[in-house]
Amino acid sequence: MFITRFFNAHRTWEDWFGMLLGLAIALSPWAAGDAHVGRIAVWNTVAIGVLIFFIAELEYVVLQRWEETAQLLLGLWLIASPYVFYYSTGGSLRFWHSTLGGLVILLAALELWQDWERSDREMLDNGRLFGK
């Protein structure tokens, strides 16, 4: 019974957790002590974190499916970033990005699962701006 309710309802903690993940991603080069990996890699990380944060915040206000899809793609890009920007061999930033990207993907997949059969009207009704 609990499992069914857990997977069928979009909860506000998921949006807050998404915002927290975005903040953690944006700060991860400095938290890992690897801010020296290169400007492009750091700017890429900050941009991904900010985008995830604002998409999660938007999801809290107006729930739409594209937001979860965008978060899923951003999580995949975060995991691929160490290999694209050549900082996968040194430091712990690759581990941070793989872990945080995996959490973003899991959260986005959970939210997509929860909202899969909802109509567009039900999605809007679940948002905080237009909802109850």
Image: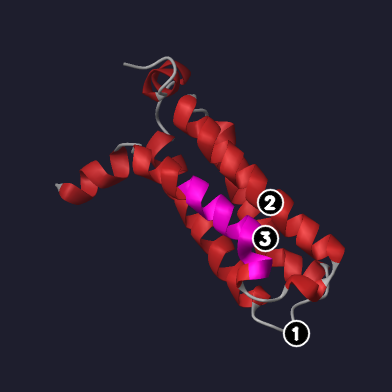
Question: Cα distance, mark 3 to mark 1?
Answer: 16 Å
Q: Name the residue under label 1.
A: 89
* Label 2–label 3 contact, CB within 8 A: yes
Please state the horizontal and vertical placement of residue 43, each as a whole percent of the image. 79, 56
User: In this rendering, does residue 131 appear at all?
Assistant: yes
Q: What element carries label 3?
A: helix
Q: Which amino acid does label 2 sit on?
A: Ile
Q: Is residue 69 visible?
A: no
> Magenta region's main secondary structure?
helix
Q: Does the magenta stretch include residue 25?
A: yes
**Picture layout, residue 112 above or below residue 48:** above
Of the image marks 2 and 3, the number of the one nearer the N terminus: 2
Q: Nearer the viewer, residue 14 or 117?
A: 14
Left or right of residue 58: residue 4: left
Q: Which amino acid does label 3 sit on?
A: Leu
Tell me which segment is drawn in magenta.
18-30
- Where residue 121 sits: x, y (%)? 43, 15
Callout 2 secondary element: helix
Please rate how many residues cluster around mark 2, counting C-alpha atoms within 10 Å: few if below 14, some from 14 to 19, many from 20.
many
Residue drawn 58% across the image and 38% down it: 55
Tell me the distance, in whole angstroms, between the alpha carbons under discs 2 and 1: 21 Å
Secondary structure at badge 1 equals loop
Label 3 crowding class (10 Å Cα cut-off): few <14, some 14-19, many 20+?
many
Residue 57 in the image: state x and y as whole percent: 52, 35
Circle 3 is placed at which residue position? 78
Q: Which residue lies furthest to the left in this view?
A: 1
| Distance in Å between CA atoms under marks 2 and 3 | 7 Å
**Amino acid, disc 1:** Thr
Residue 48's disc number: 2
Report if residue 16 lies within the magenta region. Answer: no
